Every structure is written in structure tokens, then in C-alpha cells.
């Protein structure tokens, strides 16, 4: 295992949940388990390959759990792990700030909307 050194705590956080897609995936999983197809439908612009890669990385970091149901056709669900639930306040803050930002931009006259509202 490589020796990693961080200068500030947020570096360690971003090492795990940083990037374009991971926070979006995690915010989608805050409300309960989801199948990969549902995640893909709910995340505009993510490819199947990228979704799979990001899910695997989050699973390797123990942030999400993968549950496989033994049935035909096979069914897989992802959910926040117990450890991943410790990110709830961070995820809530990110989502809330984004909603406030959209409102701020709308008040400035920008043509922007938020589907989840």
C-alpha cells in the first residue's frame, strides 16, 4: 500500500468523493438503494462505462455497498454503506448549496432550472 500524505483534510475527502460523478452518484443514493439503470437514468451525461467505474471505486473505498439478488434476470442494487452514511451532512450541504446557487442565478435573470424542485 502506498504512503499518502495530505496537507489538509479536504484533500483526503476529495481523494474519495472528488470528481464530476461521485458526488452526484452519492447524492442520488442518499434516499435509498438504487439499481445501476436507475442511477444512469438520473444522471445526465454519464456513460455506462464511467458509472460502472465510479461505482466500483466507491465500493472499493467502502462508501457504498453492492447487493446482488440471486434471481433471473440478475438484480443489483447500490446503497450508501454504514461508513458512507457518515457523508450525509456533507452531501446534504452540497445539495442544499446547489439549490441556493440555482436560486441566486435565477434572481440574476439567468435561464437556469433545477429538475428536482
Image (cartoon, rainbow, N blue to C red):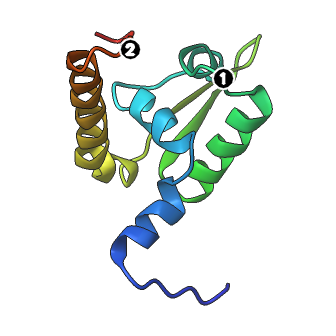
Q: Which residue is mark 2?
A: 112
For label 2, the SS is loop
Q: Which sits in the foreground, 35 or 73?
A: 35
> Do residues under tags 2 and 1 come within 8 Å of each other at their CB atoms?
no
Left or right: 114 with respect to 2? left
Q: Residue at x 37, y 68 (%)?
A: 10
Q: Which mark is residue 45?
A: 1
Q: Left of 109 or right of it: where is 21?
A: right
Where residue 33 sits in the image (x, y, percent)? 45, 26
Could you say where residue 84 lies in the image, as x and y percent from the top left? 39, 50
Can residue 79 be seen in this snapshot? no
Q: Is residue 96 left or right of residue 11?
A: left
Seen in the picture, residue 44 relative to 72 is either above or below; the reply is: below
At 22% from the left edge and 46% from the top edge, which residue is drawn?
Answer: 89
Q: Within 10 angstroms of label 2, few (less than 14), some, or many (20 or more) residues?
A: few
Which residue is at 64% across, 52% downward?
57
For mark 1, give the secondary structure: loop
The residue under the point 24% across, 21% down is: 108
Disc 1 crowd rating (10 Å Cα; few below 14, some 14-19, many 20+) is: few
x and y percentages locating residue 69 in the rendered image: 63, 24
Amino acid at each position: 500500500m502506498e504512503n499518502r500524505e495530505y496537507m489538509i483534510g479536504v484533500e483526503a475527502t476529495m481523494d474519495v468523493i472528488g470528481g464530476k460523478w461521485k458526488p452526484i452518484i452519492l447524492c442520488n443514493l442518499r434516499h435509498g438503494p438504487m439499481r445501476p439503470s436507475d442511477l444512469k437514468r438520473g444522471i445526465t451525461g454519464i456513460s455506462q462505462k464511467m458509472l460502472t467505474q465510479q461505482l466500483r471505486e466507491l465500493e472499493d473505498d467502502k462508501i457504498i455497498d453492492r447487493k446482488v439478488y440471486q434471481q433471473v434476470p440478475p438484480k443489483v442494487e447500490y446503497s450508501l454503506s454504514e461508513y458512507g452514511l457518515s457523508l450525509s451532512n456533507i452531501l446534504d450541504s452540497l445539495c442544499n448549496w446547489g439549490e441556493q446557487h440555482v436560486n441566486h442565478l435565477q434572481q440574476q435573470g439567468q435561464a437556469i432550472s433545477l429538475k428536482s424542485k
